[in-house]
Amino acid sequence: MQDDINTKLKSPEEENLNLGARIKEVEDQHLYLEAYPRGENLKFENIPKDYASREDTELVLRSFLERDLGYVDAALVEIQ
């Protein structure tokens, strides 16, 4: 009878271990998916806006890169 009880307890324990491993795997995937886009995206703040005219955002950003950050050729930077 003790062997029967041990056998019945073993199955939920194994399932619990498998679920724990699966949760860890999903957490790792989530962390990767959350961090991946941040590695290729830059956020620029505090660039003065010209409210008097309809400005070209890409041109303003390229000018900022060259003028204020000293980037040599901002025309080669891919902006999406």
Image (tube, rainbow, N blue to C red):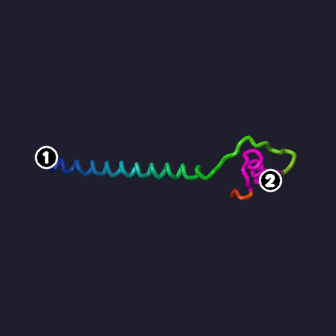
Where are the magenta residues, as a range?
55-74
SS type, badge 1? helix
User: Of the residues tagged 2 and 1, which is closer to the observer?
Assistant: 2
Measure the alpha-carbon separation of dots 2 and 1.
78 Å
Magenta span main SS: helix
From the top left corner, tell me how far across and down residue 67 is, in percent: 77, 47
Left or right? Give the position of 4 relative to 50.
left
Residue 48 counted in the magenta span: no
Question: What's the mark number on residue 78?
Answer: none
Q: Which residue is mark 1?
A: 2
12 sits left or right of 75 in the view: left
Q: Position of residue 30 (x, y in %)?
A: 49, 50
Query: Percent x, y for residue 70?
Result: 73, 47
Q: Nearer the viewer, residue 8 or 42?
A: 42
The amino acid pointed to by label 2 is: Asp
Amino acid at pointer 1: Gln
- Residue at horizontal 14%, vertical 49%? 3
- SS category of the residue bearing label 2: loop
Could you tell me which residue is drawn at 78 percent across and 53 percent down?
59
Whether 62 is among the magenta residues is yes
- Label 1 environment density (alpha carbons within 10 Å; few <14, some 14–19, many ≥20): few
Q: Which residue is mark 2?
A: 56
What residue is drawn where x is 17% and y is 47%? 5
x 13%, y 46%: residue: 2
Along the polypeptide, which appears first: circle 2 or circle 1? Answer: 1
In depth, the one of 25 and 79 nearer the eye is: 79
